[in-house]
Amino acid sequence: MRAPRLTTSALLITLAGSSIALGAGVELHVKWGSPEKTCVITSTDDGVSVDPATGNLSLTGSFAASNCPAGGGGTVPDPVITDGLDLSELPEQVLVNSTTTVNWAADAETCTYAGSTFPVSLPNWPTSGSGAIGCSTTAGCASNHSAPITFTQTGTYTFKLTCTKAGAANPAISTRVVSVNNTPPAGCIAPAGLTRLTSGTVKYNDGASRTADLTLFENVFGHDPNSSTLRTFPGTMNLTQRILMPKNGYVALKFTVPSNFTSATQGGYRNEETNQPDRPSLVSMTISQSCGDFSTTPTDPMTTKCILNRGAMSNALAWGATGLTSRCELQAGQTYYLNILYAPLDTPTTSACSLPTCSNPIQNQKTGSQQGIWQN
């Protein structure tokens, strides 16, 4: 018998070649699909009528939505994962302890995480048991599912989402493979022809200067004009510093985001006074987990928001906590480099300095309405 296609809470079904008499309240059990399901149809007060000419049986009844096919007849359409596993949420490579949120939705009746494999269990993406069932109804599958993920161990993580419809010929499958590494690339990765300055001169706008270790963020933007104390990231609020750099020189200022870092702390590195005689015509900056990273293509988990290329006067590289997607997202406990170069990133050895040495003022700018962990 061909499986009926059900579209309303009342059903008219015709069975050929039958003379069976049925009354009101009788259940008709229709078995269909693979794996097999049973759709139960209950006759209403109208009961059953038989066409005396053909012997066809007409049954008016009601049915439960579960285990009964949906649609308007014919072949059951294949399920579709309308919001699948993609590169923006599950990049190919991330550092250990990185976090992301996987969102998905489907036009399906059932979706499962079974078939996913991880070096350590992920609480929000179980791979076996009842927890591996992401949804079991059409409405449930169609709704947005949000799964926060933290990669606490190195290794290869294979995410798999499989969605099905009873009676459909094919499942819908979405997969992503993520490699979780322990450390970023070793050493500085600046393009050939550039030299990292490890020590040099830093000036205030009033002309006062000092010699500083240029490998650490706090030696530049964490300087306290009133004492010898150096402030770690985010440093001194709204402090403007001029780093003297020769042509084809760069600095990579290392910093670690503190554990009490939240979205209340937001900031940026703002260019000031470009195009002066001793200023470069532009300043480029990146925030990366690699020293000397001047690539225009960010390495996961960094984004394009962590790159300022050809920054002119008043341009800024804005940063904030994870989740502030309009800014370069920084994670508490992670180590980064603020890489600064007086040249375009696409031609990094073409200096924007008109003199042998330049020193553009850069402000360690506090932004947002809340101070957070900033220090004056």
Image (cartoon, grey):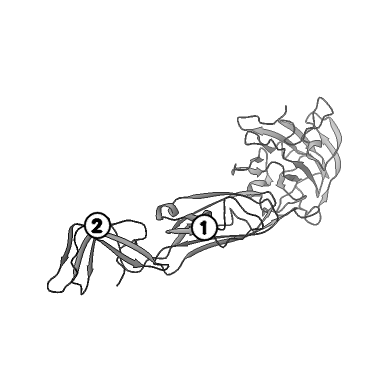
Q: Earlier in the sequence, mark 1 or mark 2?
A: 2
Residue flagged by tag 1: what amino acid is it? Gly
Q: Residue furthest top?
A: 226
Along the viewing direction, whichever of 226 and 72 lies nearer the viewer: 72
Tell me what residue is drawn at x 83 percent, y 29 percent. Answer: 208
Please state which of residues 255 and 192 is positioned toward the viewer in this rendering: 255
Q: Is residue 192 above or below residue 289?
A: below
Q: Which amino acid does the dot numbered 2 rest on?
A: Ala
Q: Secondary structure at mark 2?
A: loop
In the figure, residue 177 lies in which quadrant? bottom right
Q: Give the farthest residue toward the left.
A: 52
Category of crowding for the residue at label 2, using alpha-carbon neighbours closer than 10 angstroms: few (below 14), some (14–19), many (at least 20): some
Q: Quadrant of the C terminus?
A: top right
Residue 10: mark in rendering: 2
Q: Which mark is residue 84?
A: 1
Q: Position of residue 331 (x, y in %)?
A: 67, 43
Give the quadrant of the N terminus: bottom left
- Binning the other alpha carbons within 10 Å of mark 1 as few (below 14), some (14 to 19) or many (20 upward) gives many
Residue 347: x and y, percent?
73, 54
Between residue 168 and residue 105, name the one nearer to us: 168
* Front: mark 1 or 2: 2
Answer with left or right where residue 43 lies relative to residue 179. left
Against 112, residue 244 (above or below) is: above
| 368 up-or-down from 293: above or below | above
Q: Within the image, what quadrant is residue 2 found in?
A: bottom left
